[in-house]
Amino acid sequence: MKIIRLWRLASISVCVGMLLTLTGCWDRREINDVAFVLASAIDKENDSFRVSVLIPLPGNMGSMGGGGGSGGQKPFAIKTETGKTVREAVSKLQFRLPRHLFFGHRRVIIIGEDLARTEGAKTVIDALTRTPENRLTAYIAITKGKAVDVLNADTRLERFSAESMRELLQSEASVRISVKDIISKIIAVGEDAFFPYIEKVKTRVKGSEAEDVLIEGFAMTHDGKMTGVAKGSTAIGVRLLNQQFRKYDETFNDQGNYLTVSINEAKISIKPIIQNDNITFRIHSKVKVSVNEDRNLNRNYDDYEQRKQIEQLVTKRVVEDIKLALDSMQHANCDAVGFGLHVYRAYPQIWTKQYRNEWDTIFPKIKFEVSATANLYRFGMTSENLGRKDQ
Amino acid sequence: MPTKTKARSLPEGKLDHYAINKFQDVPIRPTVEANGKIMEELFKDSSDIVMREFEIENGPKALLCYVDGMVTTSAVDAAMKALMILEGGEFTIDLITETTLPVAQASKIQFYKELLTNLLSGDSVLFVDGQDTAVCLGLRGGIRRSVAEPETETVVRGPREGFNEHLRTNTSLVRSKIKSPRLKMKSFVIGTETNTNVILTYMAGIVNPKLLQEVEDRLSRIHIDGVLESGYIEEFVQDQGFSPFPQVQTTERPDTVAASLLEGRVAILVDGTPFALIAPFGFWQWLQASEDYYERFMLGTLLRWLRLFSLFVALFAPALYIAVSTYHPEMIPTNLLLSIAASREAIPFPAVVEALLMEIAFEALREAGVRLPRTVGQAVSILGALVVGQAAVQAGIVSAAMVIVVSMTGIASFTLPRYNAAIAIRMLRFPIMLLASVFGLLGIMIAAMVVVGHLAKLTTFGIPYLAPVTPVDLSDMKDVMVRAPWWKMRRRPKYLTPDNLERQRPQPE
């Protein structure tokens, strides 16, 4: 009996041992054998895609081991390849890389303007979502000019341009837009996607020349194709209209005296009104304002009237910005705010019957009523300007 | 069992070739001469046995035997003096013990087994001519280690005395903590050759009688030639012999024993070792140090969480590193991953090999540190720190990240207050690492499930090992993940089913 039991035990353990050793392909992959893609750029080249990836070179990162002496080398490499599909380009890229390309850490995807305008951003969405390695939380942006150039920016402040782009795209300078936001906007009828529009600029101070990535504004798309750009005040209008508001600063010329305030909070209310088959939107923005800098030495913040004056300035500016944004959106036929969805929520039946299929033609002609209220609720550590003589 | 008539005679052949049990029913002979002959034969070639023949004044011959070095010589001298100047013709052994001998512990013995046991435990034995009863004089002495600080369980706050190798010192230490007649010390002799004294101690009226009976049964079932350490007993009395997890707690601290007894546990003290056994011993005791109860309760609670966390680190950290870095790199934050990648860049080994290498080196270092003479130990630790720590990283053989993981694991495993539990964790780490290297996180989960399943099935003296968490008892949770303040712990742990739950209310009796 004992021998039989021992035999059984021995054979089971041999079988288990063989199971462990005979598995041909498991997905074990040492960190040394993986090339982590931190960002990728997709451009159009003739009628195919040019995919470029940014790969950090751990050996050149200078922390330890490897060739620590070679200081001047970049800590990253950019590899690029073309293909009829994004995936084809990637697999062609893989042929010349000794390490396995791994997209699980790709946090930034940038698309060249040329591609965005001709083919549209929607053509690459499938490549960004089909395999589980892709992060849906990766930030996505459209670049002015070639995306590769932006990818190759030497920002000096961060080790990789990917890192500086990621920080920038999630900072207050932009509206956070990730792949999954784009998907939900592209899929929805009655809403269009807009992307951060970034550009490479040069800092030309002697001794600290660098290339910076700058957020210029937003790229408007219609049906996944880029149709316009909102810059400056227009871009601010877009941000005000968007639900995800991030604070920003605004400067006014108040009778020759400049005044900078920051808009800390903004609430937008959008109300579709259908009257006689005519659709209008009533848009009201409520902003909260604080004073950052005031060049008017004599302004008295204890005075209600003078505070009111600032509020009026802000109100006027907010309305202007929103109108500019609406104009440019209508011009680009890009329903970045999702006005269509507002109609759908308020009048679901009318929407499906009347507007859903012709929203593209209706949207550019819609009338908006824009109003705003501002509330100056904070004017800093002092209510008086400390630059003036005591009176 | 031999019949009584048969046993009364001496065993045949050489007397000194038999275990003491053979002399179970051999009676003391009535003459000193006969007894002397038996003793001579029993202790042939035993230079440490002293047999002193003398005459009681105006009376019969007497023979005093003792083991040299195990008695207090001056006390023996005094006893002999008292006998030698004895006056008066008629006497019996009773008379001697009752009136003459100035000895506190004196008992009459009729059979050889008892006589030999006592003699070899350090008592002096007196035969008197014409008497078939010997007198056993408790004049034990000799050199012993003094009570010192327990080395394996040091505390910042709390008593500093620890058990030593002398059983009676140990029992007295416990008795001095619990001055109550309820504290019982039941004596057992285990080991046919070593005849080791083993004491089962418990609180009458607190301990569950069934538990007590079970421990007694298990103790009396042990048949072995020798018990040199309480570890022998531990392996015999535990529920599940093949489990890596200890089911009996070991301690060097009398206060720990006392506290356990008051909770309704039992303790086993073994002669010749400072380590007492406490049963039952469940998983949650792993995390309890005696200091938890002496310092303020908040600290006790905090430390318990820390220890639980350390336990997981000690068990899973290297495995997690292997699994995440080779199978799931997307789980590591990008910047950390890049740092790890940079430190691993020049490493020639896969992460598993690296981890195993480092873990084995660490275990070897630890073992060397324990086993080596103390003077050399320091050299080993310096060597280890330099070779394993710095040189290996600089030479590019192991990565800095791995050194951090391994040292964190080491530190974490030292935070467990129960050394024998930490051993189990140490052992399990290796199979888990292998599983992680083959199956990634899935392997770790499989290992965790197996371990938890085993723990859930395990019992310690019939009590579930994970009690009171599974089976759950909310009122017992006061001493598991938190250490409730003393004024809140009014009851003894319910899962031990003690006879008396009340800890803080006055007793009705």
Image (tube, coloured by chain):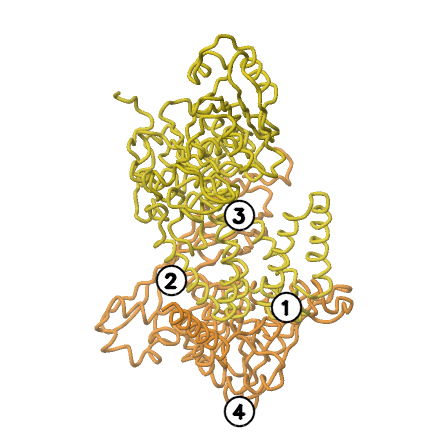
Chain colours: A orange, B yellow
Kindly identify the amino acid type of the residue bearing the numbered disc 3: Val
Disc 3 to disc 4, how far (Cα)?
A: 52 Å
Disc 1 to disc 2, how far (Cα)?
A: 42 Å
* Image position, residue A82 (x, y; %): 57, 87
Closer to the camera in the image, A73 or A340:
A73
Disc 1 to disc 3, how far (Cα)?
A: 36 Å
Chain of the residue that carries numbered disc 1 in the rendered image: A
Residue beneath disc 1: A160
Closer to the camera in the image, B205 or B361:
B205
User: Does residue A280 sit above or below A286 in this rendering?
Assistant: below
User: Does residue B177 sit above or below A332 in this rendering?
Assistant: above
Kindly identify the amino acid type of the residue bearing the numbered disc 1: Phe
Chain of the residue that carries numbered disc 3 in the rendered image: A
Residue at 70 percent across and 66 percent down: it is: B396
Q: Are marks 1 and 3 in contact (CB under 8 Å)?
A: no
Residue beneath disc 2: A370
| Pointer 1 local density, CA inside 10 Å: few below 14, some 14–19, many at least 20 | many
Mark 1 and mark 2, same subunit?
A: yes
